[in-house]
Image: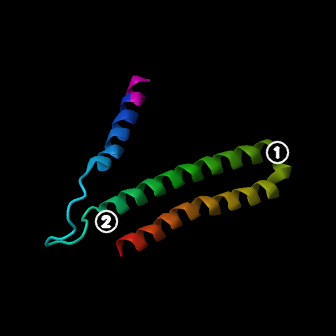
Amino acid sequence: MKTKFFLLMMALMFCAIPMFAQGGASGGAGGGNIWVPVAAGISMAIASGLCALGMGSAVNGACSGIARNPAAFPLIRFALIFGMALIESLALYVLVIIFVKVV
């Protein structure tokens, strides 16, 4: 329990770091923020990982439901495919947002 609390607090502290960053002038040689592609890659990795976990959980639930009640197979299959489409749309939305922000 202490380890989970510690990791949660560390994640919250790292998320709060940009809040204390200074605004600075927007001039300079580079002209852009070099961390945008890095953050985009990390966000896509997190979204893909969470989508995979959600899909695995959905398939697990569907297989359990079909094993318990084989007569409900068509309804469970429809709900599974619809849920998978919604879960996959999350990853596609993240990908579109990344292309809009980075490119």
Contact flag, marks 1 and 2 (Cβ < 8 Å): no
Residue 95 placement (x, y as % from top left):
46, 67
Residue 81 % position (x, y)? 69, 61
Q: The magenta stretch spans which residues?
A: 1-5
Which mark, by number, is residue 37?
A: 2
Return the residue at label 1: 69
Residue sitting at x 82%, y 45%:
69
Figure check: 10 above or below 98: above
Most extreme residue toward the top is 2
Image coords of residue 55 (percent x, y): 59, 53
Residue at point 38% right, 39% down? 12
Q: Within 10 Å of the Cα at label 2, are there few (<14), some (14-19), or many (20+) other Cα atoms?
A: some
Q: Which mark is residue 61?
A: none
The residue shown at (35%, 71%) is 102
Name the amino acid type tagged 2: Pro
- What kind of element bears circle 1? loop
In the rendered view, how is the structure colored?
rainbow
| Residue type at tag 1 | Asn
Q: Quadrant of residue 67?
A: top right
Name the quadrant of the N terminus: top left
**Residue at (34% x, 59% y) in the render:** 39
